[in-house]
């Protein structure tokens, strides 16, 4: 396997690295025309269009009446006698509890300030009314991303969203994977739909006879769903435009074995052939051992073809002269996931400005955050951690400013407001204020 090996900044510049990674960005542009047609079709034909696409791509016997999962199926989703399923659902329940505890700390409160003249200013925080969550079904619905349901639904619930709808592509027989229904049961969600891809986003955005429209669409999906979400911004809110997964590991070669770093890099490379996995180190012997470990571990993976392609195209082991250069490069990459596999990660933490999530030390591999620790795993990609944040309770809230000016406020400031309006050529604005002074 020929993973890239770079020396930064001696042999490769930041502009070179940026150019090499640019091919991962905006792949959805290639399907935009098709997605626009799908959105319009669903807007025009509603349930029938959604059912037509579902027949074509997921279940060839699908009918509009099958769109909504009966509530009884969700209510009884945990009535299984399969011991493994029962144990798995207990893990899901514990994970949901940890995610809820973390997100409870994110809740923002409405606030007020008062002035001596009696003016009151403030901000009211309210949840949106209705949210639509997308859960990828995985390989034919057999490997559903249950964690995505937890990571999207729990912060919406903590925000106080009153109505949460979930959708996922059906399996070939028209059913949904029982793990999705079991997780919905644990979360207390009873509105679940069998639909996927761009037509699911369109149904949530525009509404159909069966599916009420939503205010926010959240959840990861394929290139068609991602493109649909981008095109629907303004019609609805979305969580973010998520690109392929990525990880950067800073390793000093002292804390953590090469085998651990290789395993962590592969945990993202196996996602997608467009995934990026980068190790930054100033220890050349460690870098050599890491390359050997990557070769050996990749061959042993069930998804070795995907991981190998990702590493060859978008992976790299980057040798830097020192820790300060490693930090500089991390802040330029602004990775989705960042592991600090160094002896003293806490001393480095304050220097990191741009990363979606930061995993500290040798005992915090990235999958701990994906599934169980509590922080959200929906994170900014493609360098957008420079200005974006993880999905949070705030993603499902909106804020309204409140202004209650007293008579004394206008006496003191009214003429200034009118003058400001006239500076902008807005006479009616000025007269609106001055009309209060007329006897």
Image (spheres, rainbow, N blue to C red):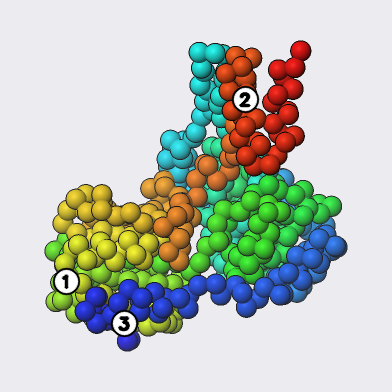
Q: Give the mark, 1 or 3, whose residue is nearer the N terminus.
A: 3
Per the rendering, the mark at residue 415 is 2
- Which image quarter holds the C terminus? top right
Q: Secondary structure at mark 1?
A: loop
Q: Which residue is denoted by mark 3 in the rendering?
A: 4
Q: Residue at x 52, y 25 (%)?
A: 111
Q: Are marks 2 and 1 in contact (CB under 8 Å)?
A: no
Q: Is residue 258 left or right of residue 309?
A: left
Q: Which residue is denoted by mark 1 in the rendering?
A: 321
Q: Secondary structure at mark 3?
A: strand
- Of 263 and 204, the residue lying toward us: 204
Label 3 or label 2, whichever lies nearer to me, is: 2
Q: Residue at x 65, y 57 (%)?
A: 233
Residue 320: percent from left, percent from top = 20, 72
Residue 230, quarter of picture: bottom right
Residue 139: percent from left, percent from top = 57, 70
Q: CA distance from mark 1 to mark 3?
A: 18 Å
Crowd rating for badge 3 (residues with CA inside 10 Å; few <14, some 14–19, many 20+): some
Residue 334: percent from left, percent from top = 37, 62
- Of 101 and 205, the residue lying toward us: 205
Crowd rating for badge 1 (residues with CA inside 10 Å; few <14, some 14–19, many 20+): some
Q: Secondary structure at mark 2?
A: helix
């Amino acid at each position: 396997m020929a993973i890239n090996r770079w020396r930064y900044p001696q042999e490769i510049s930041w502009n070179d690295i940026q150019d090499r990674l640019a091919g991962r960005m905006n792949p959805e542009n290639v399907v935009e025309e098709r997605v626009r047609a799908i959105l319009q079709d669903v807007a025009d034909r509603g349930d029938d269009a959604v059912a037509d696409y579902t027949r074509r791509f997921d279940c060839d016997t699908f009918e509009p009446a099958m769109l909504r999962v009966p509530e009884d199926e969700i209510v009884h989703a945990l009535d299984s006698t399969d011991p493994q399923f029962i144990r798995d659902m207990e893990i899901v329940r514990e994970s949901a509890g940890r995610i809820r505890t973390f997100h409870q700390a994110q809740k923002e409160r409405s606030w007020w300030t008062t002035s001596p003249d009696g003016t009151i200013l403030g901000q009211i925080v309210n949840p949106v009314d209705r949210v639509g969550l997308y859960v990828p079904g995985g390989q034919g619905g057999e490997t559903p991303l249950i964690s995505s349901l937890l990571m999207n639904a729990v912060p919406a619930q903590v925000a106080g969203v009153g109505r949460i709808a979930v959708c996922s592509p059906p399996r070939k027989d028209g059913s949904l994977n029982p793990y999705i229904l079991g997780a919905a049961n644990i979360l207390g969600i009873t509105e679940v739909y069998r639909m996927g891809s761009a037509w699911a986003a369109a149904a949530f955005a525009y509404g159909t006879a069966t599916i009420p429209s939503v205010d926010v669409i959240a959840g990861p999906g394929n290139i068609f769903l991602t493109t649909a979400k981008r095109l629907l911004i303004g019609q609805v809110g979305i969580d973010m435009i998520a690109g392929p997964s990525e990880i950067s590991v800073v390793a000093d070669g002292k804390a953590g074995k090469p085998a651990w770093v290789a395993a962590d890099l592969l945990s993202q490379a196996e996602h997608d052939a467009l995934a990026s996995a980068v190790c930054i180190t100033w220890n050349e012997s460690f870098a050599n051992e890491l390359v050997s470990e990557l070769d050996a571990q990749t061959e042993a993976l069930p998804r070795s073809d995907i991981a190998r392609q990702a590493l060859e195209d978008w992976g790299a082991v980057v040798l830097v002269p020192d820790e300060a250069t490693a930090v500089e490069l991390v802040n330029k990459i602004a990775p989705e996931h960042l592991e600090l596999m160094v002896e003293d990660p806490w001393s480095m933490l304050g220097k990191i400005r741009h990363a979606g999530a930061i995993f500290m030390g040798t005992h915090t591999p990235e999958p701990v955050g994906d599934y169980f620790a509590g922080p959200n795993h929906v994170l900014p990609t493609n360098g957008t951690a420079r200005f974006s944040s993880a999905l949070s309770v705030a993603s499902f809230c909106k804020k309204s400013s409140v202004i209650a000016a007293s008579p004394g406020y206008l006496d003191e400031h009214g003429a200034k407001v009118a003058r400001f309006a006239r500076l902008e050529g807005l006479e009616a604005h000025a007269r609106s204020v001055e009309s209060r002074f007329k006897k």
